[in-house]
Amino acid sequence: MEPGSVENLCVVYRSRDFLVVNKHWDVRIDSKAWRETLTLQKQLRHRFPELADPDTYYGFRFCHQLDFSTSGALCVALNKAAAGSAYRCFKDRRVTKAYLALVRGHVQESRMTISYSIGKNSTEGRTHTMCIEGTQGCENPKPSLTELVVLEHGLYAGDPVSKVLLQPLTGRTHQLRVHCSALGHPIVGDLTYGQASGQEDQPFRMMLHAFYLRIPTSAECVEACTPDPFVPSLDACWSPHTLLQPLDELVQVLRAAPDPDPSEGGPGPCSPCTPLPGPGRPPPPPETEVQRASCLQWLSEWTLEPDN
């Protein structure tokens, strides 16, 4: 995947009501900055000026968020009714999301559930980051769950790394990055939660990619699987040597998994998803009034949180 430009927006799903694009790394979804900067909103306006919605501040209704440094599948609703149907899927925990990542070291367990609670970091100089419960300065930690499956072991720029599939079962800020770091396997290129390698002078990107997305709205099932960017043909620094789990098999599991019945789920956070088959786990925490108010505000006018 080449670096982003205003002309090279990649669309992986399109219907009357939704677009799913393969967002480039190091591209913001939108920006209020005074300086000229590439954003997904500008790419969309350039490619689809006729689809811009004048009723929204940025012209498009983004159904969820991806960090600036994260690439991959991001869904855009093309009208308020579609945004409402997507919101209900997120709220009822019917959305399936899976990410690919390269993480430091060889993860020994082939599959695990990561359950560190995550809160805001109040430590001076780290106030725009998150941390796990029990660390100094961790404020208001909340239960957080991530499923991890190891795909391959190999080397990146000579250092041992693992290629993994991650599924966030809750939607905390920077959840995947914090959970991988807490395991002692930070994401390659994560300069906030990782450690610099002596043999590597900053990778060209953070190696986290939103790989698979399914939003089963009442009118249509929005489903997209983006290309895997972590292959040697695209990045010569990555050299896999041991295959543990074929990615194609996991994609089949993701596609075949039934969507949860909202009548059985009850209210929940705005961004969890259906996990891969695995051992039993505690249910996600109930939705708070603050979370519900936040989701309703998102529905009326989606806005991005300040860049972290």
Image: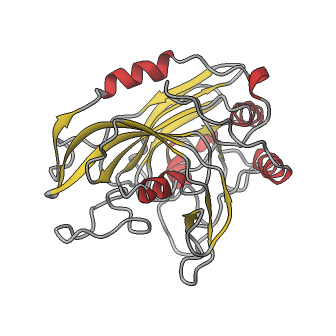
Label total for image: 0
Point out residue 265 in the picture as x, y percentages from the top left corner.
74, 27
Which of 96 and 267 lies nearest the eye of the viewer? Answer: 267
Residue 27 falls left or right of residue 297: left
Residue under the image location 55 percent in, 69 percent down: 135
Point out residue 121 in the picture as x, y percentages from the top left corner.
60, 71
Which of 84 and 114 lies nearest the eye of the viewer? Answer: 114
Would you place residue 94 above or below residue 59 in this image?
A: above
Point out residue 86 in the picture as x, y percentages from the top left corner.
69, 33
**Tell me, what colour scheme is on the image?**
secondary structure
Which of 1 and 308 lies nearest the eye of the viewer? Answer: 308
Point out residue 230 in the picture as x, y percentages from the top left corner.
28, 43
Q: State the quadrant of the C terminus.
A: bottom right
Would you place residue 28 above or below residue 301 in this image?
A: below
The reply to whether residue 308 is in sight is no
Which of 245 and 71 lies nearest the eye of the viewer? Answer: 245
Residue under the image location 38 percent in, 54 percent down: 4
Would you place residue 297 above or below residue 32 in this image?
A: above
Would you place residue 128 above or below residue 239 in this image?
A: below
Q: Quadrant of residue 196?
A: bottom left
Residue under the image location 40 percent in, 54 percent down: 25
The reply to whether residue 162 is in sight is yes
Residue under the image location 51 percent in, 59 percent down: 28
Residue projecting furthest to the bottom? 124
